[in-house]
Amino acid sequence: DGRELAALMESPRRPPPSLLSDASFESLLLTLSFLDPEEILTVESVSKRLRLVALSNRLWERIVRRMPPSLRRAKMSMKEENETKKTKYSRLYVPSLRFTGSFKAVFTGLSHAQRLLGTGRIQAFDVLSDDYLSASSTDHESQSLRNTLDASPSFWSSKGGDDSKGETIIFSLVSPVTVVSSVAIKPYRASYQLGHPCYAPRGLRVSVGYHPGQFIWSSDVFDCANQPSTQVFSFEPQLICGGYIKLELLGRYQTQREDDLYYIVLERVRVEGFPLGALSRPCPALALAVVQDAVTRGLNPKLLEKDHRPQYQSLPASALSSSSSSSAPTMTPERILRSLGQYSEGIMANETQKRREMALVRKEIEHERFRMAGIICARSETLRRCSHSRDVICQWLREKQTSEAKLREPVSQYLLEFISNGIPLTHAESYFVGELDIRHPRRNILGRLLRNPITRILKPSEELGDYYLKRKDYEKAGIIYWESHVPDKVVDVLIYRKRYQHLIRAVINTGVDLQDLVQRIVKLQSHEEAIRFAKQFCDFHNPSHNDMQAIVSALGLDVQGAGSSAPAEVIAKAYEERFGQTEL
């Protein structure tokens, strides 16, 4: 009736059931962990309950350890749309971080570190060190792992095995706690072997840790191409730290013709990153958290002293004992972080000096003061020892070598200081010398630099030989190929120059495939020249019946209905038909 209705209307209203009030703390924690940090700050002002969850250290711990949601969504869309462009990200993240402090402060440090990297205030550089090197196998002592640390044609080679056998190589990093952002390898192409085989691994797995016998993080397996080009594998936006890095080379592509065994050969290994000490001042909370994590995972503080870094080892890392870390003196994380900052000051100062000198060289090149740029580079010990930086400078010179600047010879002015002081040239600089030699043949620049094999500064390469071959300077191309140990190209030069007596000696002494050689003469010269070579081969060498059959088959001559001596008669008849009695 009316009285009951009035009483019902005057009674206090109950709020409708709320999803937030019924949800547990763990459910809200899991839900908010999938949001972007900016969205969490917005949710923080909705209610007291959400504010309590949003300020929880456990929530920020999950955010710090997980990939940013925006990056995950971008990767999913890239996979669906089959795009290949690089995804931008707003911050770094640490997959597994053992830390007892404020994870929100760590998150702030990760965001600030990303801004420092994005603006170039902290720049990644090659952080490999030769204090400790280890390989599971080495084919020859001259092919050690140390050869991969510099941009040179030398290489490291494993021992032979089957195609499924893997190899392990371990390097120390420049600092006991180093941030690693990417790894690059360059497989080696053996130009001195027939067919120019490339000896790349089929796959690569990267591990990072604080001791050469114990690694705390491992990547997924990256696929490697069997190509002699630099292949880069990036870990960003993960913040990966350690003092040692292990590369597991999984599987093999190529066999060696001499022993029919599979090999892995690397020409260059480069690891990009920077010492953690570079973050000690701009991001102290982040750096301290990483140090605390490193201590719990076996960081030995004694490694902060240079004399205690492990020296070069030829034994596998598994043979080393990790007991040294247990006997290390106790140091607080704050003290370790201060030591890391001091330890990395010299490293960062050296890199800063290198960047400043590179900027100065770039400025001189832009103003077309090429001689001064060469003087700066040649007299700087930092740049003179870094072949990678000198190759970058050569690229700047090539960009500047326009039709207007060619009249001023930028390359010759730049290289003058190197040549006059006998400073060994890099491969890129040696290529420039070849261009100058072609442009000024009367100066005989290449001949003068190659004249003294003891003090010569030029580095011959296959690319330089190809440059001379393209310009039909066969004599110098042959010299460059010979010095670069490229026998296939040497044979091509002999074919171009019609030095058939030398080719015959190559067949006799080095085992060059005769049928393949005749086909190459047909391709590079003519069918008539191939017949001329075959006739000289028969006259000056006592070939076997199988050799004669191979020559006739390569020439495509008809021997049907002839006896055992038919191949030689067919070649003589073909020669007489082409050239008559004059050359006989």
Image: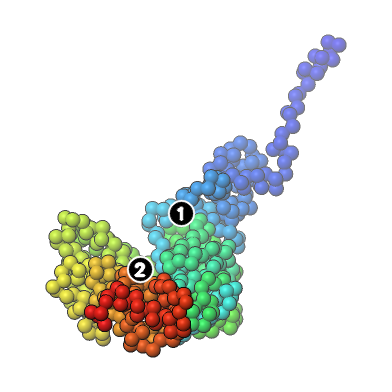
- Quadrant of res 193: bottom left
Quarter of the N terminus within the rendering:
top right
Task: Locate residue 48 relative to residue 37 in the image: left or right.
Answer: right
Q: Work out whether residue 268 can be spotted.
A: no
Q: Tell which residue pokes out farthest to the top in this image.
A: 2
The crowding category of the residue bearing disc 2, from other C-alpha atoms within 10 Å (few below 14, some 14 to 19, many at least 20), is: few
| Percent x, y of residue 507 | 38, 83
Q: Is residue 39 above or below residue 244?
A: above
Q: For the point 59% across and 73% down, which residue is it?
A: 164
Quarter of the C terminus within the rendering:
bottom left
Question: Dot 2: what SS?
Answer: helix
Please, what is the three-letter code of the amino acid marked with disc 1? Gln
Q: Are marks 2 and 1 in contact (CB under 8 Å)?
A: no
The numbered dot on residue 523 is 2
- Quadrant of res 2: top right
Q: For the point 41% across and 73% down, which residue is it?
A: 557
Which callout, 2 or 1, points to the residue nearer the camera? 2
Please, what is the three-letter code of the amino acid marked with disc 2? Lys
Q: Tell which residue pokes out farthest to the bottom in this image.
A: 542
Task: Locate residue 127 relative to residue 206 in the image: left or right.
Answer: left
The numbered dot on residue 114 is 1
| Percent x, y of residue 127 | 43, 69
The crowding category of the residue bearing disc 1, from other C-alpha atoms within 10 Å (few below 14, some 14 to 19, many at least 20), is: some
Question: Dot 1: what SS?
Answer: helix
